[in-house]
Amino acid sequence: MEFIIKTGVIPRTAFTIFGIEIYWYAIIITTAILIGYLWAKLHDGRYGLKYDNLFNMSLIMIPVAILCARIYYVAFKWDYYKDNLEEFFEFRNGGIAIYGALIGAIAVICIYAKIKKMKILDILDYLAPIIPLCQAIGRWGNYINIEAYGTETNWPLKMEIVEHGVTKYVHPTFLYESIGNLIVFFVLYKIAKNRKFSGQVACAYFIGYAFVRFFVEGLRTDSLMWGPIRVSQALSLLLFVCALGIYIYKSRKAKA
């Protein structure tokens, strides 16, 4: 029995306002962010943190995260962008990377926490469940744009695409990662309610997401490369090992 995911069913453009096309991808990402805000509001006061403080922080964090996501992508596509720097801010043509966004977001959290005298690990734990939930939603933008898909496959579950007039069946990596992120979200949801040590939820996120991304990245055809190395796959492996080591160490210390 086969289950084939058809592409091109939903047009890339949702609607047009004053001649400006509004893409479904933008709507999906915005929806994910709003759901993230709702989650944060519903858990106001957790770990002694106030939603209002985190909301104010997010006004800086989200733009910085988006900018860093773009910088990360451009850095590993430098052979192209060095001669096309005018395209750096053309976000509508795609080209952002989640790991770049995470680096930017964590940098803002560290600076904001120091200024406001807040605990960095508590902020990370508070926000950690939001991230995979938003990622799970956001990946559906890749489906609509017909991007970030995998290699050709004969698996029962596959996605149909048309490249240069040729129909191909590929791994729906957007779906794999979306489902994987949802699983990570539910695990974090449970851990967050019974946190045993500061940083536990954040470590669990990096363990879970790095595990999912490592295997999904190996199937993709559009990986950012550093020579022969898939950058996101290598970074996922490094994060998995480091986060797992920290998690085990702090778990044992909490029990001592």
Image: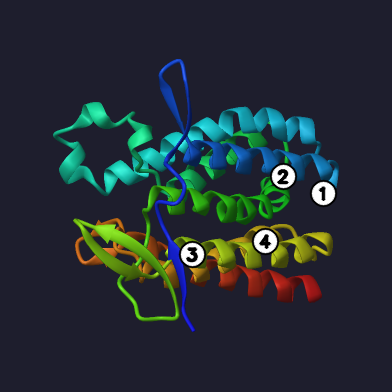
In this rendered view, identify the residue nearer to me: 94 or 60: 94
CA distance for labels 3 and 4? 18 Å
Residue 26: where, in percent of width, then height?
50, 36
Comes first in the chain, label 3 or label 2: 2
Residue 237 shows in the view: no
Residue located at (36% from left, 45% from top): 72
Q: Please name the amino acid that badge 1 sits on.
A: Tyr
Q: Please name the amino acid that badge 3 sits on.
A: Leu
* Residue 47, numbered circle: 1
Residue 157: where, in percent of width, then height?
46, 75
Comes first in the chain, label 4 or label 1: 1
- The reply to whether callout 2 and callout 4 are in contact (CB within 8 Å) is no
Other residues around mark 2 within 10 Å, as few (<14) / some (14–19) / many (≥20): some
Other residues around mark 3 within 10 Å, as few (<14) / some (14–19) / many (≥20): some
Disc number lying in front (4 or 1): 4
Disc number lying in front (3 or 2): 3
Instruction: Report which residue position mark 2 lands on.
Output: 119
Residue 177 shows in the view: yes
Instruction: Report which residue position mark 3 lands on.
Output: 239
Residue 248: where, in percent of width, then height?
65, 75
Q: Secondary structure at mark 2?
A: loop
CA distance for labels 3 and 2? 22 Å
Other residues around mark 4 within 10 Å, as few (<14) / some (14–19) / many (≥20): many
Instruction: Report which residue position mark 4 lands on.
Output: 185
- The reply to whether callout 1 and callout 2 are in contact (CB within 8 Å) is yes
Q: Residue lying furthest bottom in this view?
A: 1
Give the side of residue 64 with respect to residue 42, left or right. Answer: left
Disc number lying in front (2 or 4): 4
Q: Please name the amino acid that badge 4 sits on.
A: Phe
Quadrant for the C terminus, please: bottom right
